Amino acid sequence: MVEFRLPDLGEGMEEAEIRRWLVRVGERVTAYQAIAEVETDKAVTEITSPVTGRVAEIRVGEGTRARKGEVLIVFEEEAATPTGARAQSSPVTTATTQATVASAGQTAQAGASVATAVAPAAGAASGGRRRVLAAPAVRKLAFELGVDLEQVPPSTPEGRVTLADVRAFAERQRTATATPRPEPEPAPANGAQPQPGEAPVVEEERQALTGLRRRIAERMERSWRSIPHATAFDEVDGGALVALREALLPVAERRGLRLTYLPLLVKLLIPVLKEFPIFNASLDEERREIVYKRVYHIGIATASPEGLLVPVLRHADRLSLAQIASELERLIEGGRRRTLGLHELTGSTFTLNNVGSFGGSSGTPIINYPEAAILAVGRLQEKAVVRNGSLVARPVLPLALSFDHRLIDGAQAGAFLARFKELVENPQQLLLDLV
């Protein structure tokens, strides 16, 4: 028997959740065949079998979290294994185990490459269930749409199921089941029981808190419990910012860049963080030391279909405005598709939350633990303001700065916002600092 254990996933990750098993007990698998989808704090990827044999036992069920080193699945290895499939006849070594799940610490793109490379071997699997040839992105889409991949007819000559195949099958399913059903009658106001023959009224529905949603809940709880939050609010006249973006748009479009306000705000934020280093710091709670970060890795809060992610724009102070725009587009799209690796989702030193991107005017952001602060920027919209004694319409940008009150006082937060406000209203000041 060969025990497959959850390996070291890197980036300090000590556990992962089994999102979905791709094999069943008694099924024959081949070496490097995808056997499960696992989810760490942010990334979803597939893990593969270290041996050729049959599944003897699955010890960790779907939706259950496993810690590093815990046995996930047990295989009954076939007597004749390919040369090099295992280094020894003893249970799988740490090196072999880590090699088979290298994708767990890498990007989902790498996982897709592994799945593609071993597809012919996976297709040879036999047993009670047909092994479907499909990339991780296809399996993820099928999972989200509730589609059984075994029922999807492949469109490729080699029998591989594509994203288009899954979408077409899901559409056919929706069409077939789109017959109107009568709405259930509301429950009697007097609390009387339904009459015989009447359908019972469903009063509530429960759903397990799993996957990314559970991790978000845990991180929010930890941040709120550990950090005494305080929030400062302000508003900025965004007229100069609007004019700057409009002037740069034609140049950006010629370069194939999508220039939003976010890259400009990141560029304006960096000198403020350098001027107020406590906002780019964290508190070592065990040693009671303030840790000042000398790098500027800006977390960008991004909404995905499953919840909030924070892709990290690394070394933002070393990037040009065009580079920031290009990298942000890649990170935000990767965050929405859940294709980013752990190194692209961890290590931020300060977080910028653009709530205006999804229509929010303002709000109180929760600090991305263990950082010291987070800045939320609301929707840029016209408001009536007083200028020289007269009411005029101006584009106004709401700001909300939440900070760790153990490290930062209200006066410092006010000075931080005032400096950021000054740069947003006069972005040409940055020209003085260009090398």
Image (spheres, grey):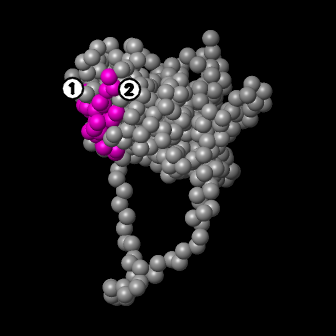
Name the residue tied to disc 2: 52
Give the residue furthest to the top: 435
Secondary structure, mark 1, is loop
**For the point 78% across and 27% down, which residue is it?**
254
Extent of the magenta region: 54-79
Q: Which amino acid, by three-letter code, is at mark 2?
A: Thr
- Place of residue 183 in the rendered image (x, y in percent of width and height, measured from the top left): 51, 77
Front residue of 32 and 297: 32
In the rendered image, the vertical position of residue 408 relative to residue 394, given as above or below: above
In the rendered image, the vertical position of residue 188 relative to residue 214, given as above or below: below
In the rendered image, the vertical position of residue 216 relative to residue 293, given as above or below: below
Mark number displayed over residue 286: 1
Q: CA distance from mark 1 to mark 2?
A: 46 Å
Question: In terms of sequence position, does the residue under pointer 1 or pointer 2 come before the other?
Answer: 2
Q: Is residue 129 magenta?
A: no
Q: Residues within 10 Å of mark 1 (few under 14, many from 20)?
A: few
Q: Residues within 10 Å of mark 2 (few under 14, many from 20)?
A: many
Kindly report which numbered mark, 1 or 2, lies closer to the viewer in this rendering: 2
> Residue 62's image quarter?
top left
**For the point 36% across and 42% down, which residue is it?**
24
